[in-house]
Amino acid sequence: DYGTTVTQLIYSDYKECDVTHFYGKDFGGPHLELWKHSAAKQEARLLNAAKKIQGRAAETRQK
């Protein structure tokens, strides 16, 4: 457990990573971190597509 945390985005297009400063109340900091975001973007696209399909299915059922 890190306690209360603060993450500040510094740069969002470093190859496939986001660069952030991270500070945790019980962990200290700030620490420089790299977060790979390519998989998250793909998962977000899939989730959004699934939500659209669910919405269309609900509309169809209501008709």
Image: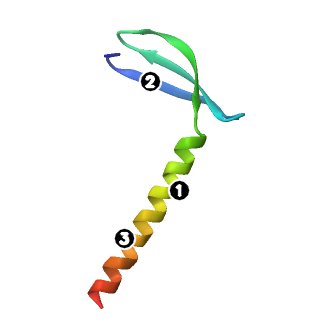
Front label number (2 vs 1): 1
Secondary structure at numbered mark 2:
strand
Write down the quadrant of residue 19 in the picture.
top right
Instruction: Give the CA separation, mark 2 to mark 1.
Output: 26 Å
Residue ranking furthest to the right:
15
Q: Which quarter of the rendered picture does the N terminus lie within?
A: top left
Judge whether 9 appears above or below 57 on screen.
above
In the depicted structure, whether residue 28 falls above or below residue 23: above
Mark 1 Cα within 10 Å, few/some/many (few <14, many 20+)?
few
Residue located at (37% from left, 73% from top): 55
C-alpha span from label 1 to label 3: 14 Å
Q: Given the image, on which type of amino acid does mark 2 rest?
A: Val
Q: Residues within 10 Å of mark 2 (few under 14, many from 20)?
A: few
Q: Name the residue under label 2.
A: 6
The front one of 18 and 23 is: 18
Work out which quarter of the rendered image holds the C terminus and state it. bottom left
- Density class for disc 3 (Cα within 10 Å; few <14, some 14-19, many ≥20) is few
Instruction: Please say which color scheme the image uses.
Output: rainbow
| Amino acid type, callout 1 | Arg
Between discs 2 and 1, the one toward the N terminus: 2
Dot 2 and dot 1 residues touching (CB under 8 Å): no
**Drawn side of residue 29 relative to residue 4, left or right:** right
Please tell me in which quadrant of the rendered image residue 26 appears.
top left
Q: Residue 7's x, y, as percent? A: 49, 26
Residue position marked by numbered label 1 in the rendering: 45
At a point 42% along the width and 71% down the height, the residue shown is 53
Give the percent coordinates (x, y) of residue 56.
39, 78
Disc 3 designates what residue?
54
Callout 3: SS? helix
- First in sequence, mark 2 or 3: give its number: 2
